[in-house]
Image (cartoon, helix red, strand yellow):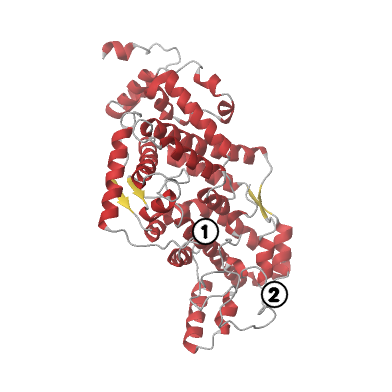
Amino acid sequence: MSDIPFGFGVPPEEPEEGDDGKKPGGSGGGSRGPAGPFGFGGGNPFGGPGGDNPFAAMFGSLNPNDLGAAFQQLGQMLSYEGGPVNWDMAKDIARQTVAQGTPGGSKDASVGPADRAKVQEALRLADLWLDGVTSMPSGAGSAVAWSRAEWVEATLPVWKELVDPVAERVGTAMGDVLPEEMQAMAGPLLGMMRSMGGAMFGTQIGQALGTLAGEVVGSTDIGLPLGPAGKAALLPVNVEVFGEGLSVPQDEVRLYLALREAAHQRLFAHVPWLRAHLFGAVEGYARGIKVDTAKLEDAVGQLDPANPEALQDALQQGMFQPEDTPAQKAALARLETALALVEGWVDAVVHAAAAPHLPSAGALRETLRRRRASGGPAEQTFATLIGLELRPRRLRDASRLWASLTDARGVDGRDGLWAHPDMLPTAADLDDPDGFVHREQLDFSELDKILGEAAGGPAQDVRRDGDKPDGTDEGKGDDEK
C-alpha cells in the first residue's frame, strides 16, 4: 500500500524555498515545515506570487491589487459547494504544474502538424499489425496527438470517477469528528470543512496530475481508459523524452508505444463490461477505506489558524488506511488481478505484433517492464490518489499466462476468455498458469453462436436455449447453420 495514500503527500519536485518577496509573518513565517496547509505548495493556487504557505504568500505581498485577488480566490474556495473534490481547482493547478515543465527541463508545447501526422501514421500502422495477432478489431475511431495540457483536460472526467469515492469517505469522516458540544452550531463549520477538504484534495490531485502529464505517453498508461472512448492518443513530447538514451530510433519507439495504445483501445472497445468491472473494483476498494477518527479528532481539535501546517502533518501520519477485513482484501485482490490481466494481455499481444517488425521490440518491452517494476510515475500517481500500488509480479505472470494460452488455444481461444468476467483467470490461476491453460476448455464456437443469436434474434429464445443445463442444444446450432 502507499505510504501516503489519497493525495496527501507533497510531491518531491516541489520547491522548498519561498519567494524573495515572501515576508515572515506570525508564528509560521520563517519555519521550514511541510509545504503548506492542506497540501498547498509549489504553484500558489490563490494566484499570488508563490511560496510554500499560500496564506503567507498572500499576506506577504504589499500590492493591494494582488492581495484583493487573493482574497477573492480564497472566498471562491470557501464558497465551493460541489462534490468532495474541488475539480476546478484541480484542473487549474494541473495546468500550472504542466506550464512549469518537468524537473528535467522538458516544456510542454502545442502539437504541430508534422508530429500530429507521425502519431496518426504510427497508430494506423499499429492497428494493421495488431490485426494479425488478435481477433478483436480496431477499437479506435480516431487517432490524436495531445499536448500535456490537452491530456489533463481530456482525462480529468475519468480521474473524477476514480478519486471521488475515496474523497467522499474522507470528507464524511471529517464531519463526524466534531465534538458533541459543537453539533448545534456545526452547520457553517461543516460547510467550511467540506470546502477546505475539497480544496485540499483538489490541490493535491492537481499537482499529481500535472506531474503525471509530464510522464505519460498515451491515454492508457495505468491500464485504465483515461481518455474519451474510441480515441487513441499519444503525447509526442513525452514519447520523445521516453526514447532518450535508449539507443533506439524514435520511429520505433513511437510505433511500439502506438501498439500498446491501440491494443488497450481494442480491449476496452470490444469487452463492453470491462470498464465498469474495473471502475467498480476501484469503488469497492474505496468503500473499505477506514479513517482513524482518533487521529482526525486530535487534528481538528488542535487546529491552530496560526499553524495550519499541523493538519498537513496529521494527514501524513497514516490516518487513512484500508480496512483489514476479508471483504477489503478480496476487493484489493480483485482490482489488482483485473488490472494485471489487462496489462498482461496488452504486453503479450503487443510483443507478438512488434517482434516480427521492430528489431528493438524486446528491448522496448523490457524497458517498459522495468519502468513498471520500479514503480513508474503512473503507478506512483495511482497509489497516491487511490491508495493502491500494483504488484509488478502479477503483470509478468499475467503476460506469461496469456502467451501460454495463445500457444495452447490459439488467438480466438485466448481472446474468447474476455467474453465474460467469470471466464477470466483468477489470482490463483496467475500462481498456476499451466493449470489454467490446460484446464478443460469451454466451447467458444457455441458461445459465439449464443452471442450472435442474442444480438440478432429473439432475446427470450436465446436465454432459454443458453440456460439448458443438459447441453441438449450443444451442436444443434452448428449443424443447422
Image coordinates for residue 171, horizontal then vertical, percent: 59, 60
Where residue 108 sits, quadrant-wise, is bottom left
Residue at 45% x, 41% y: name it: 276
Does 369 sit above or below residue 313? above
Nearest to N terminus: mark 1 or mark 2: 1
Residue position marked by numbered label 2 in the rendering: 304
Indicate the amino acid at tag 2.
Asp
Does 46 sit above or below residue 479? below
Q: Nearer the viewer, mark 1 or mark 2?
A: 1
Report if residue 141 is visible in the image. Answer: no
Residue position marked by numbered label 1 in the rendering: 208
Q: Does dot 2 land on a helix, a strand or a loop?
A: loop
Where residue 291 sits, quadrant-wise, is bottom right
Classify residue 247 as left or right of residue 308. left
Q: Pick the residue in front: 214 or 201.
A: 214
Instruction: Compute the Cα span from label 1 to label 2.
Output: 27 Å
Does 477 sit above or below residue 249? above
